Amino acid sequence: MATDLVNTAPVVRRSTGEVLVEPPDLERFLTEHEVRPDALARTGTPSDDDLEEVRTLRQEARTLLEAAAEDELVDGATALIRRAGVGPTLQRDGQGRWQWYVTTAPGAPLADELAVLLGTGLLGALRTLSHDRFRHCASQECDGMFVDTSRAGRRRYCMPEVCGNRQNVANFRARQQRR
């Protein structure tokens, strides 16, 4: 989710611009990621302030993804968790399956709840995959970020269906022109 949030920025989406323009855009992002923060249970929908705070969090997440040293990433992700984190719990979901739930402090703002989720996810990815799996998109047209979760560790694009496809089309056209 951290990389997906980072990749909503206008610096990444050069051709389409900002993805999180209005609070309903943030609500859609949360729904797509199946995130149901307590803050929205209290307020119903994200506010303009929530949107601005999440955009700030987005830049913080990018800074962590670009961290040169593992310790810097760990310190930053731990700070995100401490904003509102209470601790993880294992509970059954609606289908009876065991799921991890990250518990946050009562009354925590939306951005702090997301910070806890992002920090937890980044630490899990670092521990499981290693720091060298945190990468920039290889496309010259994109400034996106991703965590390479592929088995072989050879993923090159933040959104293979977009950035990878563009590169493949460009390579195809270049080959056709050389003929």
Image (cartoon, rainbow, N blue to C red):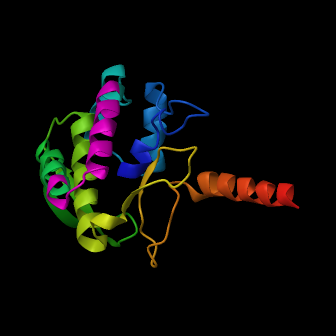
- The correct choice, above or below, for 130 with respect to 38 in the image is below
At 55% from the left edge and 54% from the top edge, which residue is drawn? 159
Residue 84 lies in the magenta stretch: no
**Can you see residue 156?**
yes
What residue is drawn where x is 23% and y is 52%? 119
Furthest-right residue in this view: 179
Residue occupying image coordinates x 26% and y 65%: 126
Residue sitting nearer the eye, 3 or 31:
3
- Residue at the bottom extreme? 152
**Main SS category, magenta section:** helix
Q: Report the side of 107 relative to 94 (left or right).
A: left
Q: Which residues are magenta?
A: 52-72
Query: Left or right of 169: which side holds 78?
Result: left
Q: Nearer the viewer, residue 162 or 121?
A: 162
Quarter the C terminus occupies: bottom right
Q: Residue at x 35, y 46 (%)?
A: 36
Q: Position of residue 74 (x, y in %)?
A: 16, 57
Residue 176 percent coordinates (x, y): 85, 58
